[in-house]
Amino acid sequence: MKVMVGGTFDPIHDGHKALLSRSFELAGRDGHVVIGLTTDTFASRKTHPIRPFEERRRELERFITGKQFRATWLIEPLNDRYGSATDADFDAIIVSEETLPVAVEINKLRRGHGKKKVDIHQISCVLAEDGRWISSTRIYRGEIDIHGRVIR
Amino acid sequence: MKVMVGGTFDPIHDGHKALLSRSFELAGRDGHVVIGLTTDTFASRKTHPIRPFEERRRELERFITGKQFRATWLIEPLNDRYGSATDADFDAIIVSEETLPVAVEINKLRRGHGKKKVDIHQISCVLAEDGRWISSTRIYRGEIDIHGRVIR
């Protein structure tokens, strides 16, 4: 099946890895995964500095090619919360707990555009050692590393 | 992976078939699917009469055994909206658009019980010929058949 997933992926932490791995697993061996990667303009609304798109894309490509995923894949620039998901033909969108509302919204917009609603797969956030979510913000702040290990 | 799904399944319509097929697909060849089947007492809150548990269970078993699903499976009586999902060890719950809030609630309860949250897979409802959802109530009313074909 064809699935879509999105993010800023800076840096790629264990939560992102779970999200991406589950996306490829859902797509299956003959499937296709579209990964929306936020553009620098869109990502600039984050509360902490973000590495440039090309650098984030290279890291994402390195992670994906390093795995034994069977599905084909494509990285697409994401200029807003929805990207091409409101109109593209695909089967399922993969989101985290934080972005579940965006997926529900995408289905509403699809309906308005006369498009078939897609399945929504929400993965549970990966917890850090301290029982709180792993997030880029926490990594940036130096609280945890990309595996969720507490730094101080 | 181990997944859970639930319903009254009376009668098994194309929406249920999509829900069950996706559950087995997600579980994968080495996976396990637990199907919660509402008890007669719990199902009696529906607005229309429901066939007895044993009859519904036999129809469910016939549907599952008639497919080439690889995962193992088990039918469990469901006495309330949650069943064993608030405490069992499993990976993902499969719900329809109508029951997404129940899955979110289950994860909250799991958290409270010190259990790992599970992934939530929401499948899009299957539409009848008239563009509205296929549902047991509409079938009972004689508006559509189990494939969503309009009867009158």
Image: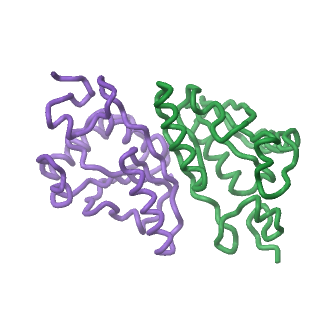
Chain colours: A green, B purple
Q: Position of residue B93 (x, y in %)?
A: 44, 53
In this figure, what is the number of numbered marks?
0
Please tell me which residue is depicted at 26% across the width and 44% down the height of the picture: B61
Q: Position of residue B128 (x, y in %)?
A: 30, 28
Please tell me which residue is depicted at 66% across the width and 52% down the height of the picture: A18
Query: In the figure, is residue A133 to the left or right of A121?
Result: right
Q: Position of residue B41 (x, y in %)?
A: 16, 60
A98 and B72: which one is in front? A98
Name the quarter where the C terminus of chain A is drawn: bottom right
Name the quarter where the N terminus of chain A is drawn: top right
- Seen in the picture, residue B144 relative to A10 is either above or below; the reply is above
Please tell me which residue is depicted at 31% across the width and 32% down the height of the picture: B14
A91 and B101: which one is in front? B101
Query: In the figure, is residue A152 to the left or right of B81?
Result: right
Query: In the figure, is residue A151 to the left or right of B40?
Result: right
Image-quadrant location for residue A26: top right
Query: In the figure, is residue A109 to the left or right of A98?
Result: left
A40 and A133: which one is in front? A40
Image-quadrant location for residue A82: top right
Q: Position of residue B89 (x, y in %)?
A: 47, 64
Please tell me which residue is depicted at 75% across the width and 41% down the height of the picture: A38
